[in-house]
Every structure is written in structure tokens, then in C-alpha cells.
Image (cartoon, rainbow, N blue to C red):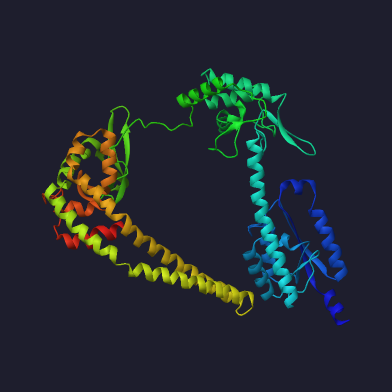
Amino acid sequence: MQKETENKHLRCCIYARVSTDEQAERDLSIPFQLERCRYHAQGKGWEVVKEFIDAGESARTDKRPDFQKMITAARCIEFDIILVHKFDRFARNDYDFIVYEKELEDLGITVESVSEPGDASTPAGYIGRRMMQVISTWYSKNLAMETRKGLVKKVEQGGWPRRSPLGYVNKRDKGNAWVEVDPQMGPLMTQAFKEMASGKWTLKEWADHAYSLGYRSSAGNKVPVSSWCSIFHNRFYIGEVYLRKGDMPVKGTHGPLVDPDTFARVHEVLRRHDCYKQRTRRHKYLLRGLLYCQNSQSPCLVETHPKKRISYYRSKGKVNGEQVFYNTKRIDSQMYELMRELTISKESAKVLEEKLSQWFDQEGTSDDDLKKAENRLIRLRKMEKNLQKLAIEEGISFRDFREHRSEIEAERASLNSLIEQIRFRRNLVKADFEIALNLAVQLNHLFEKGTFDEKRLLCETIFKRLYIKDHKITKPELNSPFALIASMASSSVSLQSGRPYRIRTCDTLIKSQVLYQLS
């Protein structure tokens, strides 16, 4: 009698969910779930205070709008029980189910199922609920795999597993689904390809003209320029199908609206004058994105005066209310002298190569830090498993579980970063340095004899930033490992700013400058 009295005062919320929009639109599942849950709550004497519905949301993730609203309401203790038709409506992910169930339990809220009753506080009820959750997770993953197989098989047989593009309509009966030509829009799409193949339209002009001719989307709206771009690149219109873009297309069972020759001519027109292809820049700048103005303490932008036909590097910041302009020819001409100063002799390259080879050999045999980091990662995995076990067995509170898990994840991220740096330094740095060393021997020759694009690529490879002041390059900030190679230049002549390079011993440079910068 006392238990029945307590039940009358229990507040209940109902959570209903379906995975697909199609189910939600046809009311195949949600009304049924709500009806069963309401009837069950009435029989138990529970007061239904809220109802949460996620239509077309997968339970493999917790990123569901009404599910999160329900969890927020639970944290405010707005109800005592969450009632679902089946537990897989609540979650189909092991981790999400256990974590949220534990959090709700700490709040004094239980999750109950109409179709799968059982008291989780008892050993038998607990193991039963866990088994149902494992089966639900397996079903979800297996369904995704089988669905993928079905889509691949359908495409291999020439079918189209998704919504048909403009000009076609989807057809369906009890056992089959196929695509047919839309009797109204199909001929219009054929004409659209012919018009575009003539070369007299750009995409924007055609989109406006097509709207005036009566071309409409499936929703009855104007077909935007971006959609026309996708249409004219879609091989479905020449009778081919594919599962994803980039897959090898196969012949489809639907009728083509365009012949391959017309389709190819349309592509040629789009390459020539559509506004979606990659444009070639009209003006080229050797040091674009590399210059930093010391006068204004800001990076430099670029611009070309159209009438005077003069190009400038322009400071982003201002000095005394005005931007600083640097003539590109005057600045670019200084790069020849800079490249000569950075070029090293073959003798210096051989000495440096021998020193580095010795150091790399020593570094390769020293892997104590790597072993320590890997062993610590193994211990962290064991700690995480024990922590999860304690949380499931109620050995620790959910708050403590989240706090310890966050600490473990932070340490794991730090260790993974350290391991990545060690392996990078060991496996890649030597190869990178050897390539850079070969370049450094012939920098002067490559820059003087190269084309503009080759010079630009060389500058991007060598320089991280070039500082400029009073129309002179004052100092270069080099990408590794060129920072080391620069100090080995045959001449230690200063740059135009008058600041000389500091020459150090090879051992010091190798250990302190190159390798740690690269890592």
C-alpha cells in the first residue's frame, strides 16, 4: 500500500525517438511510442509532466536536440522517471547509455522501459539491462554495415540509392524503387545542357535566364547558380551512377538526358569562362605574405596601381596615420644579394654533413624518452579501464569519474604529442636536412636562373618571414633547417641592415638550433 502511494507522487517524462525523417513524417513510430508510454505511466500511477520527441535523430550519438533538453531538465530535477518504449530509444551507444544512466542515478532519476521491464538495482536486472544494451549496439552497427552493402550492391546493379536530381523523379512500389525521367523537367534539362554547350552563357547568366523560362527546383523555387554548377558536373545525366563523388561510375538503369559529347562540351565551356574555376592571378608578387614592416609593426599587403602600373608592398598598420609603401622592384632586387649570402660552399656542406651524421647516429640509439612515454600510455589505458569498472560498479561517483577521466585524457594527449615529436625528429629530420643542404649549396644559381614561379617557391621554402625597415630587408627569419645552414655561409657579411650572422661551432648549432626547431 505504501509503494502504491509513493508511485502516485512520482513525476514522469516520456522520451520518444525515430531514426529517419520518413518514419517521422508518416507517423509510423512516435504516436505509437507515446501512446504505449502514456498507458504504462497511467497504470503505474505516475504523473506525466513532460514529453520529449526526437524525430529523425540517430541514437548512436547524444547530439539530439530534445535528448539534451531532457538531460538539462533532469539536472534540474523536474521529474523522477524517464520512460521509453524500448531502451534503444534512449541510446544505442554503450558509453552514452552507461554514462547518462549513472549520472541520472546519482540525481535520483531512473530510466524505465515499457517493453523491457526489469529492476536494474538487482543483479539479475542489471545484467539483463546490460545485455539488452549490448544487443542494441550490435544491431545498430550491423544495420549500418548491411545498409552500406545494400547501397553498394544497388549502385553496382545500376540503381540510384538516393533522391534523384532535377529532371528525374523517384518511383517506388512494394518491392522496388527506381528513377524515371520527369515528363515536365526532363526535356528542359536536355535543352539546358545544349544551351550551355553553345558557349554563350555564363553560369550566372544562365541561372537568371532559366528562371525566366520556367526552370524551377522541386520546391518550386529558382535554381541557384551553385546548383546549376553541380547539375552540369553530374554524370547522372549521361546515364551513369556512383555511390560517392570520386567513385568509378557505372552504367545506370535510368534513361540519359544528355549525350556524352554535349556533356564534354559543357565542361569545356565551364573551364573557359565560368566563375567557379580557379583564376590565375593577374599580378604576381615575389614576397607576398612573407614581408613584415618594422616601421608599423604589422605584416605587409600587396597592391598594384592600375594606371601607373606600379606594384607596392603596403603595410597593414599605419605610421603617423598613414600606411607605408615599398616599391616591389626595389625590395625584390635585394633578394639576389641575400641569396648569395645564404649560399654555402661545398666544403662547408661536407663538414656539416659529417657532424650531423654523427649526431643522428647517437640520437637514434637513445630512445629512453620514447619508451617511457609508451609505457606510461599503457598504464593510462589500464587506469581508464579500472576507472570505468569502478563507475559501473558504483565504486566512485559520476563527478569523480568525469574528473579523473579528464585528467587521463589530458595526460594522454600530452604523451601522444611527445611521442609524435620524438618519432618525427628521428625519422624525418635527417631527410629534410639532407634536401635542404643540397639546396643551400646552389641557392644563388637557382635564384638567378629560375623563372618567377621557381623563385617564389624558393622564397617560400627558405623564409618564414622577412623583416623590412626604411625600404631595406633588415633580417630574415628562416624556416628550419635553413637557420643552421645560413650560419655556415662561406661569407659572414651582414645584410643591408648591417647586422652580421653569428658564426658558432657545428656541435652547438646542430643540437640547439636545427633539430629542436624542426621538432
Q: Quadrant of residue 13?
A: bottom right
Nearer to us in this view, 441 or 29: 441
Along the line of sight, which residue is nearer the eye, 145 or 343? 145
The spot of residue 59 in percent (x, y) is 67, 57
Q: Is residue 137 left or right of residue 382?
A: right
> Does the rendering let one see residue 334?
no
Q: How many marks?
A: 0
Please state which of residues 460 and 371 is positioned toward the viewer in this rendering: 371
Instruction: Say whether residue 499 is left or right of residue 401.
Output: left
Identify which residue is drawn at 56% across, 75% down.
Answer: 387
Residue 414, position as x, y percentages in the image: 42, 66
Residue plotted at (75% across, 37% down): 176
Tell me which residue sits at (61%, 22%) in the image: 258
How far across and down, in percent of the image, does residue 296 sit?
A: 28, 50
Q: Is residue 490 above or below residue 420?
A: above
Q: Image point 21% across, 46% down: which residue?
A: 438
Is residue 195 shown left or right of residue 475?
A: right
Which quarter of the figure is the C terminus placed in? bottom left
> Is there any visible trace of residue 142 in the rendered image?
yes
Residue 35, picture quadrant: bottom right
Quadrant location of the N terminus? bottom right
Q: Is residue 322 above or below residue 514?
A: above
Image coords of residue 46 (percent x, y): 83, 70
The relative height of residue 231 versus residue 498 in the rendered view (above or below) is above
